[in-house]
């Protein structure tokens, strides 16, 4: 069983920001706060078309793209980009356009498995994975749990190293909490962000 690993807070206009690290169970841990519960004004610039993953896929639809509609009519889309990592855009029905692609998690490691996207009451939960030898059938080496809220200008990201990847993400009806699960669970709340394993949410 692997405990949740590195946590970072990613801005939509910048690469991941990592704070306070300490070793535990052989993984790197850091503590971040989630985007605040009070939704900030949406200052996003909507001028771009929707982009798709540049990774080859023979079937349709590609698992390397994921899109969902929020309760307020906006849409959010994430995709894998070769040499960049996990990329996000969100759509305004008023502007009829998307934001420019922004890297939520930057890595040059190969994409591994598809993207899982869940949303409820303004909270967006994402599962994504990367692996050095995933194309050869090896498990992921970087398993992501990510959460965005409000204007989607900031994302909380938790990275677990050498883990088989989260199987499911469940968003509470009020959007205040997310539970990522496999053989263990990882919890996120609007009040506390990602809660370290073994710590009860507040």
Image (tube, grey):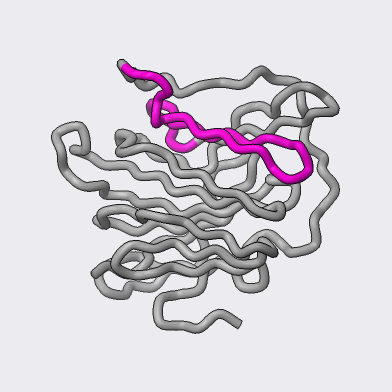
Camera-side residue of 62 and 149: 62
Q: Eyeballing the image, is 54 above or below 118?
A: above
How many marks do you count on the picture? 0
Residue 105 x/y as whole percent: 48, 43
Highlighted range, magenta: 59-86
Residue 95 x/y as whole percent: 83, 24
Q: Quadrant of residue 88?
A: top right
Q: Eyeballing the image, is 69 above or below 194?
A: above
Residue at the image position 15 percent from the left and 38 percent from the top: 137
| In this rendering, position of residue 137 left or right of residue 13 | left
Residue 45 among magenta residues = no
Camera-side residue of 184 and 154: 184
Residue at the image position 57 percent from the left and 54 percent from the top: 147
| In this rendering, position of residue 73 left or right of residue 141 | right
Camera-side residue of 183 and 33: 183
Q: Quadrant of residue 156?
A: bottom right
Q: Eyeballing the image, is 51 above or below 172?
A: above
**Quadrant location, the N terminus:** bottom left
In the displayed orientation, state which residue is furthest to the front: 173
Residue 74 among magenta residues = yes
Residue 120 x/y as whole percent: 65, 53
Residue at the image position 67 percent from the left and 72 percent from the top: 191
């Amino acid at each position: 069983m692997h405990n949740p690993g590195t946590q970072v807070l990613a801005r939509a206009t910048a690469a991941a920001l990592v704070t306070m690290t300490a070793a535990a169970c052989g993984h790197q841990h850091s503590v971040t706060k989630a985007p605040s519960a009070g939704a900030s004004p949406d200052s996003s610039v909507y001028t771009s078309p929707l982009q798709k993953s540049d990774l080859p896929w023979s079937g349709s639809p590609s698992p390397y793209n994921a899109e969902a509609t929020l309760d307020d009519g906006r849409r959010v889309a994430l995709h894998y980009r070769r040499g960049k990592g996990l990329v996000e855009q969100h759509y305004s029905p008023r502007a009829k356009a998307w934001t420019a692609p922004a890297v939520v998690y930057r890595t040059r490691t190969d994409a591994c498995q598809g993207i899982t996207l869940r949303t409820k009451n303004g909270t967006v939960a994402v599962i994504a994975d990367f692996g050095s030898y995933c194309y050869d059938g090896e498990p992921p080496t970087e398993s992501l749990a990510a959460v965005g809220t409000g204007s989607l200008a900031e994302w909380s990201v938790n990275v677990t190293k050498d883990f088989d990847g989260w199987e499911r993400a469940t968003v509470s009806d009020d959007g205040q909490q997310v539970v990522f699960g496999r053989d263990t669970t990882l919890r996120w709340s609007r009040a506390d962000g990602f809660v370290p394993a073994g710590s009860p949410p507040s």
